[in-house]
Amino acid sequence: MPKISVVAKDGTVFEIQAEPGTSVMENAVRNSVPGIEAECGGACACATCHVYVDEAWQEKVGLPGPIEADMLDFAYDVRPASRLSCQIKVADGLDGLVVLVPERQS
């Protein structure tokens, strides 16, 4: 099972064993990572699961699709590394993925 690291806004690192096919958001919520609100439950209808993908993983994770990019317009402090964690699907190739929770969610 791939391991992902979610760095909370206070710097606490949550090391999570994630089932392939689930989303980073689902795993963060399941592991009570603070700052991942996920108000829409993963429907890409809010921006409360906004994360920054670590630079070393950005190419592998890829860019947001058009709907996700539109939703990111509602997030605070959007950066080139911004993604909605509900749209990042866990796969074996993402073993070691690191994402950071921003200071504030929308």
Image (cartoon, rainbow, N blue to C red):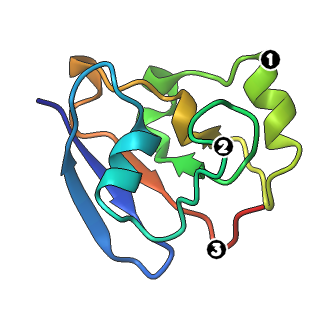
In which quarter of the view is residue 10 placed? bottom left
Residue drawn at point x = 29 percent, y = 27 percent: 94
27 vs 63, nearest the viewer? 27
Quarter of the picture holding the N terminus:
top left
Give neighbour class at mark 1: few <14, some 14-19, many 20+ (Cα, 10 Å).
few
Given the image, on which type of amino acid does mark 2 rest? Answer: Cys
Q: Which residue is mark 2?
A: 40
Residue drawn at point x = 32 percent, y = 19 percent: 21
Q: Are marks 2 and 3 in contact (CB under 8 Å)?
A: no
Given the image, on which type of amino acid does mark 1 rest? Answer: Pro
Give the foreground label among 2 and 1: 2
Q: Of the two numbered discs 3 and 1 on the same chain, state the one appearing first in sequence.
A: 1
Could you say whether the residue bearing mark 2 is in a helix, strand or loop? loop
Q: Which mark is residue 22?
A: none
* Residue 44 horizontal/vertical position (percent): 69, 31
Give neighbour class at mark 2: few <14, some 14-19, many 20+ (Cα, 10 Å).
few
For residue 76, side relative to residue 91 (left or right): right
* Residue 74 horizontal/vertical position (percent): 87, 49
Give the foreground label among 2 and 3: 2
Query: Quick one: which residue is furthest to the left in this view?
Result: 1
Q: Which mark is residue 66?
A: 1
In whole angstroms, how far apart are the C-alphas of marks 3 and 1? 24 Å
Q: Which residue is mark 3?
A: 103
Residue drawn at point x = 69 percent, y = 71 percent: 104
